[in-house]
Amino acid sequence: MRIQWGEQFITGHGLVDHQHEALFAAINEFDLALEAGLAPQRMDEMLAFLERYAREHFVTEEFLMVRADYPSLALHKTEHERLLLRVKFIRELRDQDPSLVPPEGLGKFLGDWLTNHILTWDLAVFEYLKEHPVEA
């Protein structure tokens, strides 16, 4: 399932938008690997990238939220932690038995999570930041 980067996902913060776009690209690259029959070999690579890059991205967002004294920081941070725990769980399942995590399910989960997270959580943060600006 390819996900299309578009205007509806733009937060207005250059670095965050760049990071979001990179996550879209990585998920779409995984989808291309799936179509080419290479996804099983690419899953571990995708999970490792996602875990590393998501942590880096979450630090960026959380730093901005702390600086702006964002009232829903704790809830937003919990959402970030939940994704990282899910990725860790998926990696552990794959270590036990790779057939427990079908590649198709991973791509759909990641695409759905990312688009929903940006539209539901991140855009709310950046609306707040427009009214409570901080220097990045």
Image (tube, rainbow, N blue to C red):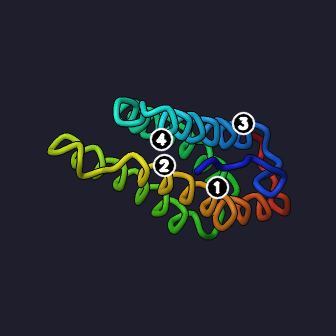
Q: Nearer the viewer, mark 3 or mark 2?
A: 2
Question: Type of residue at label 1?
Answer: Met
8 vs 84, nearest the viewer: 8
Which mark, by number, is residue 65? Answer: 1
SS of the residue under disc 1: helix
34 vs 72, nearest the viewer: 34
Residue occupied by mark 4? 55
Q: Residues within 10 Å of mark 3 (few under 14, many from 20)?
A: few
Which mark, by number, is residue 18? Answer: 3
Going from N to C along the chain, the mark reached first, 3 or 4, is 3
Q: Residues within 10 Å of mark 4 (few under 14, many from 20)?
A: some
Going from N to C along the chain, the mark reached first, 1 or 2, is 1
Which residue appears at 22% of the width and 46% of the height? 92
Could you give the CA–CA distance between mark 1 and mark 4, rounded to whole angstroms? 15 Å
Q: Are marks 3 and 4 in contact (CB under 8 Å)?
A: no
Left-right relation of 87 to 63:
left
10 vs 134, nearest the viewer: 10
Up the image or down, 5 lies above or below 19; here it is below
Up the image or down, 77 lies above or below 91; here it is below
Expressed as whole percent of the image width and height from the top left, the position of residue 55 reads 47, 41
Could you give the CA–CA distance between mark 4 and mark 2, rounded to whole angstroms? 19 Å
Could you give the CA–CA distance between mark 1 and mark 2, rounded to whole angstroms? 29 Å
